Image: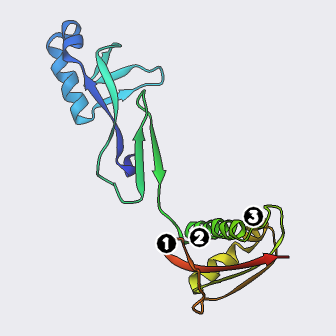
Amino acid sequence: AAAFGVRQVLQVNARAAGPRLGRDVQLAIKGSKSGDWSVDDDGVVTSGGFALAEGEYALVTQVSEAGADEHRAVSMLPGGGFVLLDTEVTPELAAEGLARDVVRAVQQARRAAGLDVTDRIALRLAGDDAVREALQQHRDLLAKEVLAASLELGPLDGEAGTTTVGDGRAVAVSLSRA
């Protein structure tokens, strides 16, 4: 977790630990700040060489900006836990997202053409090289989702009625009942 800027720190409660530890509470505080603290297998917290009792300390999970990048999202949970998400969009994920956007566009074209949701269709899609490559990678998913009996992929040659999919890419959808 440290590589992602998430770390756990010990905070000694001087008011709670002071009456029991006396001046040694300062050594426990110093230990917590310098990293000289630990939690053993039984859950006993030791700081600066002194065992701390329940209520004399708090273990806190902190998220720092060290190690942060644009592909990380961290959410703190009640009780000190956290959820770390890798938000990087790989080329594979981008291609799948584009294909799913095309499924949406085809379903809208199907509705606009007055076809039933159960009608099998002959489908022609036109787009630039990146669009065609993404659709070819996910050809089976696309055909299954839209009930395409046939699927033709071609270049975008000034077709009217293009729709935007993915990251601002144009695709033209032509369909008919199969």
Instruction: Please give the label number shown on residue 145.
Output: 3
Alpha-carbon neighbours of circle 3 within 10 Å: few (<14), some, or many (≥20)? few
Q: CB under 8 Å between callouts 1 and 2?
A: yes
Task: Pinpoint residue 57: horizontal percent, then vertical percent.
Answer: 30, 20
Relative vertical location of residue 65 with respect to residue 37 in this rendering, above or below: below
In this view, the residue in front, 18 or 73, is 73
In this view, the residue in front, 54 or 140, is 140
Which amino acid lies under the numbered mark 2 shown in the image of this protein?
A: Leu
Q: Report the Cα–Cα distance between label 1 and label 2.
A: 8 Å
Alpha-carbon neighbours of circle 2 within 10 Å: few (<14), some, or many (≥20)? many
Circle nearer the N terminus (1, 2): 2
Q: Report the Cα–Cα distance between label 3 and label 2.
A: 14 Å
Which amino acid lies under the numbered mark 1 shown in the image of this protein?
A: Asp
Determine which residue is flagged by label 1: 167
Q: Residue at x 43, y 25 (%)?
A: 40
Circle nearer the N terminus (3, 2): 2
Which amino acid lies under the numbered mark 3 shown in the image of this protein?
A: Glu
